[in-house]
Structure formats: structure tokens, C-alpha cells
Image (tube, rainbow, N blue to C red):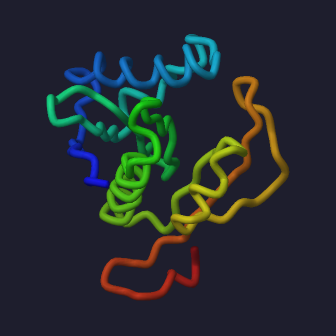
Amino acid sequence: MTPAAFTLVDADYGADLEHLRAVRETVFVQEQRVPLALEWDEQDPQARHVLALNSDGQPIGTGRLTGDGRIGRMAVLAAWRGRGVGSALLLHLVELARAKGMACVELHAQVSAIDFYAGHGFHAWGEPFDEAGIQHRHMRQVLAAQGSSSPRPDA
């Protein structure tokens, strides 16, 4: 099978809001029935957003990194799932965190996605909890300091 043709771009929240909405509202609001009022929050304007675009420049996936090291709002359109888009988005967000000098990144994983995140070096902790009517778990990945091959001992 030929690899899927897509590119990642660092998004500008204001300029790319319609692209972000096209993915997040399709996945979270329409598919998963998350209330629209819960999908968008005060962290969105300040977060670093990444978009995956198909070869025609149309949005097919997105994710964000907040200033406190939380990865979230990871969403890939159904037709593009299982084609490496989510992995590419996640790896890019982790690299953004590493470049900012963050000691670790955390996320709230839907329980159905725990294996996906675990396969990318995240570890679950704590008990399952409800977020927007969907069961989640806390997950964390300790990042190696730049130029180091091992995690920082104080992380």
C-alpha cells in the first residue's frame, strides 16, 4: 500500500480556525457527541496547533500543545485513520514540547486510544475518569533533555 500523501503545518489559531473547526467539530461534536460548548476553551487561542493537510490542502487532522505541556484535541477524520496521520501529529507535538524545553508532556486519552499513545511512549496513570461523557485516562511521557539520551532525573 502506498503511504498516504499528507503534510503537517504549524497552524495559526486565528488564520486557521476554520480548518481546525472542520476537523474537531466533525470528529468530536458530530461523531462523538461532545457538546460544542465543551470543545472550544480558553486555552485554544494560546495553544500551539498543528494541522495535517491532504495533497489538496484540505484539513484531515489536528492536535494542540498547551503552554503547560498538555497535548490534546487530537483528531483525525475517519477516512484518514490508520494511515499514519495521528502518529505524525503526535510526534510533531512531542517535538514541539521538547524544543520548548518541557520535561514531560501529558494528555487525557480516551480509553479506546490508550494503546495508540502507549505505542508512542506514553504511560497511563490514575483511575479512569469521565470527560465530556467519554472515559479517559491520564497519560504522560517524560522527555529527554535536548542533547541527552536519558530522561531528566527531576522530571
**Residue 137: x, y in percent?**
73, 48
52 on left or right of 40: left
The residue lying at 25 percent from left, 21 percent from top is 14
The answer to whether 50 is drawn above or below residue 84 in the figure is above
Furthest residue in direction right, as rendered? 127
Q: Is residue 62 above or below residue 36?
A: below
Q: Nearer the viewer, residue 34 or 76?
A: 76
**Quadrant of the snapshot with the N terminus:** bottom left
Judge left or right: residue 51 versus residue 113.
Answer: left
Camera-nearest residue between 7 and 101:
7
- Look at the picture and state if 96 lies above or below 15: below
**Furthest residue to the front?**
1
Q: Left or right of 112: which side holds 43?
A: left
Residue at 38% from the left image edge and 52% from the top image edge: 84
When asked about the image quadrant of residue 47, the answer is top left
Front one among 113 and 147:
113
Give the image location of residue 67, x and y in percent: 43, 46
Residue 85 in percent (x, y) is at: 37, 46
Seen at 49% across and 52% down, the residue is 69
Residue 103, relative to residue 94: is it above or below? below
